[in-house]
Image: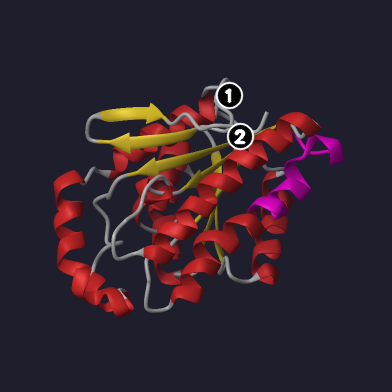
Amino acid sequence: MALSGRTAVVTGAAMGIGRAITEMLLQNGAKVALLDVNESAGQSLKAVLDQQHGAQNTLFLHCSVESEQQTKAAFQKTVETFGGIDIVCNNAGILNEAEWEKCVNINLVAVIRVTYMALEHMNKLTGGRGGVIVNIASMAGLGPLPGCPVYTATKHGVVGFTRTMAASSTASGYGIRFNVVCPVAVQTDFFSNISDKMGQFSHRADDIVKRMEKTMINVSEVTQGVLELLTDETKNGEALMVRRVGRSCVTFPTFS
């Protein structure tokens, strides 16, 4: 799918991977609704993007993905502004074993909420244009990250949810592809002050940091993976690993 002229919604869009995805989409000709709970960072990014790509191509919406009301309003505003939605990137996420329920709510429950809300606007069976939904998980969605059981569980959930939605879309004719990106640690502020986020596993913080430093990649490597999953129309239900050695899709067993 060519991105030029498409409309995308990106959650957690103001910083880190979300910002990089937003910039990649704009560089490829898409219009982007930036959803983020950090209003100051979102407004600052919007001002920068307006200078580079024109104010008519972006929309910043203050939105907590934990709020159904705010999320619903953000999608409605996007449709009113751009005329529809073709792409959704569920990027918002946290690592916080100390506040594990919040970690589950943002990393998994919100991905489900946003996806189901996106279906209301994108599903071809209900008048939508179809499109692509790409979720951002982690290598922790494919194997355990020691010391981070809840984070690992949420990312496994995102992988499973994404792949099942892909199969459901194909079987039902939604016209929407679903894929998930599973990067190793990425050079952002995501792992800053990690010991404060580890709760009962804080004694593992130094070990986790050492593991991350050995494998860390930059955000451009993640956005290239996202771009591949957006544009390659043969990709549906893929879990794309992104590592220093390159990108590869994971093969899973399926129900017969």
Q: Is residue 250 above or below residue 84?
A: above
Q: Nearer the viewer, residue 152 or 33?
A: 152
The extreme right residue here reads 126
Looking at the rendered image, the quarter that the C terminus falls into is: top right
256 versus 79 height, above or below = above
Q: Position of residue 38 (x, y in %)?
A: 44, 70
Percent from the top left, x then y, of residue 203? 19, 75
Which residue type does callout 1 highlight?
Met
At a point 37% along the width and 36% down the height, the residue shown is 241
Label 2 is placed on what type of residue?
Arg
User: Is the C-beta separation of discs 2 and 1 under 8 Å?
Assistant: yes
| Colouring of the image | secondary structure
- Which disc number belongs to residue 6? 2
- Res. 86 in view: no
Q: Is 42 contained in the magenta span?
A: no
Say whether residue 117 is magenta: yes
Residue 64, position in %: x, y? 56, 69
Residue range corresponding to the magenta coloring = 115-131
> Left or right: 77 with respect to 230?
right
Q: In this rendered view, identify the residue nearer to me: 167 or 85.
A: 167
Q: Which residue is mark 1?
A: 1
Front-most of residues 221 and 85? 221
Q: Is the magenta region chiefly helix, strand or loop?
A: helix
Q: Residue furthest front?
A: 256
| Residue at x 39%, y 48% (from the top left corner) | 138
From this viewpoint, is residue 153 visible?
Answer: yes
The image quadrant of residue 110 is: bottom right
Q: Earlier in the sequence, mark 2 or mark 1?
A: 1
Rounded to the nearest angstrom, the CA distance separating label 2 from label 1 is 9 Å
